Amino acid sequence: MQLSLNAHSSLPLVDQIVVGVRTLIDDRMLRAGMRLPPIRRFAESHEVSRFTVVEAYDRLVALGYVQSRRGSGFYVAPRTNASPVEPRRGEIERAFDNAGVLYQCLDGEATRLKVGAGWLPTDWFDEAGIRRNIRTLVRADDSTVVGYGTAQGFRPLREQLQVILGEMGIAADPSQIVLTTGATHALDLLARYLLKAGDCALVDDPGYWNLFSNLRLYGINLIGVPRTPDGPDVIALEKLLSEHRPKVFFTQSVLHNPTACNLTPATAFRLLQLAEKHNFIIVEDDIYAEFHPGTTTLLAELDQLQRVVYVGSFSKTLSASLRVGYLAANPDLANELMDVKIVSCLSTSEFAEHLVYLMLTEGHYRKFTERTRGRLADATSKTLRMLERSGMKVYAEPEGGMFVWAEVPGIPDSVHLAELASQSDIMLAPGNIFRPQMQPSPWMRFNVAHAADPRLERFFGETLGKDKYREALTRKESPSGRKAATSIP
């Protein structure tokens, strides 16, 4: 079996192998029961790594095209009455590759240490304030508790957001603001409206992994823009724009997830120039803005919502359970997105939106976020010292927020360390999930609000300090000798 693989293609080699083998099977060039080439021989004949072949074969097994027989190899699975599957770029079946991480983040297991989670511990939130305002709200004589609400969202909250955005230097009329069920919903509305299957979208590399999964679900071809401490690499970006002509670039300017770095004015100016020249929209995801202690550079402020759509949320600061977010865009685009919202979910929770409005206007919100920034600064200092003691290399010292991006020296793929941690009831976020095509990465994202638990440092000391573990991680194997999983179990 000989496939034509292109190492310079934007489609990863794993995807090329999967699509190629699937096509051969669908076209009956490979028939049920035929044995695929052994992993080592395939790798040598196609000049790719064995790990690339392993991942491709594993995915073919998951798709039902191939069967794995222990001690014998991989064979074409029976396809009786099976309809040919049209291969397409984007590989929708990969949309849920990261779901295991979310399951671990969201499960109710009290003993699990969730250092890889993307939010604060529940006891950091102002639960007493939320309960107080719920009582105020349910006593109010209106239909908030039982009504659908309006398509655009609770108007007083949109008016308050006009004030908040104005303080950031972003001029937005309430009619330009659409309330959503968290930032994830806002990003989903934008993906639905701006993109269709087969389109290219630019994303940060590394970047927000759950967005990547959602875009894959729509069949979008993800093009990673290398991230630097100053923001997107604009030199690399310009080359990608000429080759792919994307419609949209999803990025984060402030306390970027996962590196915690911030956009500089020079990079922002060049990025907006390129957006004008190449005619694409920038979606600026700014859900961590409240955790930055100082002045920041925002694309939406410089652009004033001409080509930039600004996305915000209160799930990280007020309550993850309320799920209230928003987007701000130019008037025409805001109206179009409101139509998408109506047909996809009718309306958002006016009860939750009214509650957020009360929390923002009662006078305690600013003090609460200020205290939270102080707690995060203290937790960051402790985490940096712990990572240094554990032999980690930090990408850049954060100016705020909840994340530290750190490298595990000498280990080519941190997913195998995360696998070991999960066996110790510690949930880590390996670097591969933050890459558009889930490429191997020695980096990891640490949530400082969870990282102070002594179990984490003890795990690193016991794991990275033992020769048998270090050797296994370097070989990309688990200490038991079996191949490590490509995602967190």
Image (spheres, rainbow, N blue to C red):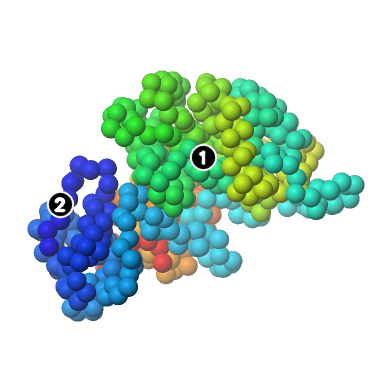
- What amino acid type is highlighted by mark number 1? Tyr
95 with respect to 413 (left or right): right
Tell me the residue at 17%/65% (across/down). Answer: 29
Viewer-side residue, 36 vs 391: 36
Task: Where is residue 312? Give x, y as percent.
Answer: 59, 38
The quadrant the C terminus occupies is bottom left
Viewer-side residue, 128 vs 345: 345
Task: Where is residue 55? Give x, y as percent.
Answer: 27, 61
Which corner quadrant of the image does residue 243 belong to?
Answer: top left
Question: Of marks 1 and 2, which one's residue comes earlier in the chain?
Answer: 2
Task: Where is residue 49? Give x, y as percent.
Answer: 18, 56
Viewer-side residue, 344 vs 351: 344
Residue position for label 2? 4
What element does badge 1 sit on? helix
Residue position for label 1? 193
- What amino acid type is highlighted by mark number 2? Ser
Instruction: Bin the neighbour count of mark 2 within 10 Å (Cα to Cα): few under 14, some 14-19, many 20 and up.
Output: few
Tell me the residue at 37%/25% (across/down). Answer: 278
Which corner quadrant of the image does residue 78 belong to?
Answer: bottom left
Task: Where is residue 482? Give x, y as percent.
Answer: 27, 72
Can residue 118 be seen here? The reply is yes
143 with respect to 125 (left or right): right
Tell me the residue at 58%/37% (across/down). Answer: 337
What element does badge 2 sit on? loop
